[in-house]
Image: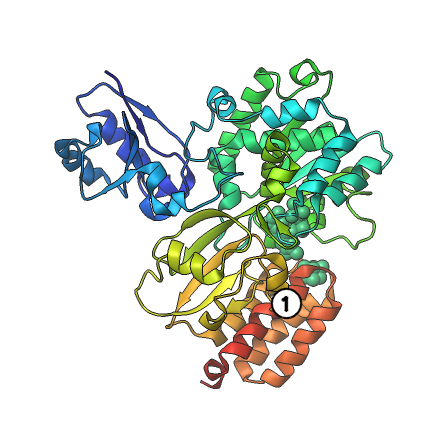
Amino acid sequence: MTITIYIPRDTASISLGADDVAKKIAELPEDIKIVRNGTWGMTYLEPLVEVETEKGRVAYGPVTVSDVDGLYKAGFLSGADHPLCQGLTQEIDYLKNQERLTYARCGLIDPLSIEDYKNNGGYAGLKNALEKSSQEIVDDVTTSGLRGRGGAAFPTGIKWNTVLAAEADQKYICCNADEGDSGTFSDRILMECDPFCLIEGMTIAGLAVNATMGYIYLRSEYPLAKEILNDAIRIAGQNGYLGSDIQGSGKEFNIEVRIGAGSYVCGEETAMLESLEGKRGMVRAKPPLPAHVGLFGKPTVINNVLTLGSVPVIMEKGADYYKDFGIGKSRGTIAFQLAGNVKCGGLIEKAFGITLGDMINEFGSGTFTGKNIKAVQVGGPLGAYIPPEQFDMPLDYEAFQEAHAVLGHGGIVVFDETANMKDQAKFAFDFCAIESCGKCTPCRIGSTRGSELIERGDFKLMMELCDLMDTSSLCAMGGMTPIPAKSAFEHWPEDFKK
Ligand SMILES: Cc1cc2nc3c(=O)[nH]c(=O)nc-3n(C[C@H](O)[C@H](O)[C@H](O)COP(=O)(O)O)c2cc1C
Ligand code: SF4
């Protein structure tokens, strides 16, 4: 009897040796079928090898090539016990305690099997959308409470409504897949492990606003995602899910992947449009909004990968189903990413409202080094540093805003007690100085002066500069640079005396 074994094929698992493990397992003298699935997001267990048994999929990890012979002798092909055995995949606490809506298929399926996709709920959302008017689709997304997952948390329904109402001969859907925040990898995981989910989300967005063309602006550091997306786009087209007559509806939608050249500010939506148009990635002044004058001057929806990736489940299960997850004005689920000095790093999809402490301690299991946590930075390189005293803060947009912090793209980077927060504050300015697009003075010059002031120890002037950058920068790059510096100075003043 053929034994089915799942070995992930995503960038992180491959970097941890998944390809070599797959090769070694293929050489075993048994009738084995290897499926290269996507990761479940339990990065600390990668490469996670799963064996299909009568009881379900039994997981072993992290597996190295040198473990394979021992696993074989212990009988892992029939799901036998072994020190690396994690039990049934679905019963692993890290996974079991999540609420997976957008990532329901990640890890489960072969990312490029459209049959797997459809057998697990895929394209049910598009089917429903094809039976609705554009306005009805937009209304559903509005009712779901979905807000942009790229950082600014802007209500998606309002954005789509603006583009729907705009008169134009051509409209576009642009997917922002620049994913430049430190400690973030959720966009990449969705694109590599369930690419049809993004494709379906973009297609529904196209139907919602009457756009026939979509672009995925992908960061150059993601070559495997590029390959998988391009394969998935081709397969979707061959199966009538993209092209000029989607599922016989007479509706048209097409997608192309475009690669950025490696600049943080090109994730800012207007700089992204400039880059997509083949120009230098400089921020545009707003208004006009991209929803009115966007790509090539046409009305454009710009959404993050996960915003678009949340649309299929909303259209499949209904706006109210999605809205029932979360708290306050933060509805649905968000993909948190645990990184930095953490024991169990990975991706956790959870409804808004879990506390930061529960996320770090229950999922992350504390620091990798075993030392005490000093700080976590949430929301990328321009997010606040948060001390353990504030770990009871719920992870939702409003609670973070109140605490002068940001949830951003859900990245959580953990630092232990050896971190020096003055160095981290200086890093924020140095990062901004390198990545600034240079269009406005507060950010272009302010970032360099901020770094110098920290070096010089003039923290009073640094705080004044922070206020200036906050109030007078043209975009959130310069406007947010003070956040990490100010939070570091506020919570760890002792580090600034050294
Ligand atoms: C400096 C800077 C970098 C950004 N990088 C990204 C990014 O990598 N991905 C992303 O989706 N949004 C990024 N954003 C936010 C986008 O400008 C925009 O708000 C978002 O793509 C809109 O999609 P959403 O409404 O689905 O979140 C960035 C913003 C700034 C100011
Ligand atoms: S704040 Fe910085 S990145 Fe934004 S427009 Fe000004 S110079 Fe460019």
Q: What residue do we see at 58% from left, 77% from top?
A: 452
Q: Quadrant of the C terminus?
A: bottom left
Towards the viewer: 238 or 445:
238
Kindly identify which residue carries mark 1.
Answer: 402
Q: In the picture, residue 79 is in which quadrant?
A: top left
Could you tell whether 154 is left or right of 430 in the image?
A: right
Could you tell whether 109 is left or right of 69 in the image?
A: right
On screen, residue 168 above or below 326? above
Q: In which quadrant of this rendering is ligand 2 seen?
A: bottom right
Residue type, numbered disc 1: Glu
On screen, residue 282 above or below 305? below
Q: Is mark 1 within 8 Å of ligand 1?
A: no
Q: How far across and how far down the image is residue 219, in percent? A: 56, 43
Towards the viewer: 419 or 280:
419
Q: Quadrant of the N terminus?
A: top left
Residue that sits furthest to the top in the current view: 248
